[in-house]
Image (cartoon, grey):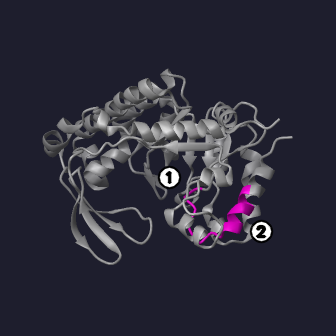
Amino acid sequence: MALTGIERISNILQRKPVDRIGFFEHFWSDTQKVWTEQGHLQPGEDLAKHFGFDMQLLWPFSVVADLDYEPVVLEETEETIVRRDGNGATLRQHKLHDATPEHIDFLVKDRTAWQEHIKPKLQPERRRINFEAYRQAKDQARKAGRFFAWAGVNVFEIMKDVAGHEYMLMGMALDPDWVRDMAMTYAQLLVDLQEILFAEEGWPDGIWYYEDMGFKQHPFMSPRMYREIVWPAHKLTVGYAKAHAMPVVMHSCGYVEPLIPGMIEAGVDCLQVIEVKAGMDLLKLYRDYGEVLSFMGGIDVRALYTNDYAKIDAELEAKIPTVMRNNGYVLHSDHSIPNTVFYETFRYYIDKGLELGTYA
């Protein structure tokens, strides 16, 4: 008998028997735009419903330091715009397509600026929470039978937005107590806001944290630095979820294999997105951790770029029959789907992946 998305994902995160592997995906925003222009989607159509996702996410919090600050445009061209935001960060963003913002300058470069300009503003105010959006998304997911997860950034991602990678990582080496204080301050803020939200609007089915802690072939910090500076904040945020019987998915782009033992010890149930081009190896991770960790992703999106069905077959056939064995796998690319992937190709990928991932 076919399970609902709630039942399927709940079991997968516990590596319990299911009817098939799960399915979820992320897209660049211009992908939906192109597919809509081509007539494959209706304007504004819900992709979760259209493709039959097993999960639905919502990020209902604002953790910007100054909630009253109106972003200031410092420079604008036809393609880019430079703004200073409520964290005092100056970032250049591309206007024509999704891209990671370019770091230009930061108000917070050391402990003094953090303590003076940012930390005092980080109070668990109700206006940081979008109660209505959470309520609507939770109800929508429940009616559709999808697993609903509160989603949001964890401390490494938040600190990066405040101090930038360069100053944050130098701080880890030169003033670790400062960065540890930032991490624990944001961890406590997240937990405090979750307590307010969930007390009024009810619990989600699980928690999803975005936390990009790696780049190509290396994490941004050593396992020792992770343990000493970031891990206590992960233990607090993930531990809060686990104390209330909520499973936790941790997203991280880049190479983060050396940090996985710490994530598991913090209580993470599933690792996502397992980026192949950064050096992550889904099959190796399954061999090493498949008894205690579920996986989502690890399918090289570059195979989909080709729009070559034979290459997609080869990628799926090399991985799914193995990683589905412990009932702990959700089909997902190792990065968001770009608009160079044809709609028909993506449909083929779903059908083939779920065919391979259906249990006898």
Q: Which residues are magenta?
A: 334-350
Residue occupying image coordinates x 65% and y 30%: 14
Give the residue number, with chain letter if any, for mark 2. Answer: 310
- Counting from the top left corner in percent of width and height, residue 95 is at 38, 70
**Left or right of 142 on screen, residue 185:** left
Q: Amino acid at mark 1?
A: Tyr
Q: Of the residues tagged 2 and 1, which is closer to the observer? A: 2
Residue 214's tag is none
Q: Quadrant of residue 36?
A: bottom right
Residue occupying image coordinates x 61% and y 56%: 333
Q: Quadrant of residue 71?
A: bottom left
Where is 31 relative to 330, above or below? below
- Counting from the top left corner in percent of width and height, residue 89 is at 24, 55
**Left or right of 76 on screen, residue 23:** right
The residue at the far right in this view is 360
Q: Nearer the viewer, residue 241 or 149?
A: 149
Where is 181 relative to 301, above or below? above
Mark closer to the chain start, 2 or 1: 1
The residue at the far bottom in this view is 78
User: Regarding mark 2 in the picture, which secondary structure is present there?
Assistant: helix
Q: Quadrant of the C terminus?
A: top right
Residue 255's tag is 1
Q: Is 329 covered by the magenta stretch?
A: no
Determine crowd level at label 2: few under 14, some 14-19, many 20+ residues with C-alpha closer than 10 A.
Answer: few
> Real-space Cα distance between discs 2 and 1?
27 Å
- Counting from the top left corner in percent of width and height, residue 345 is at 70, 67
User: Regarding mark 1 in the picture, which secondary structure is present there?
Assistant: loop
Q: Amino acid at mark 2?
A: Ala
- Counting from the top left corner in percent of width and height, residue 299 is at 65, 56
Where is 267 relative to 5, above or below? above
Q: Is residue 356 visible?
A: yes
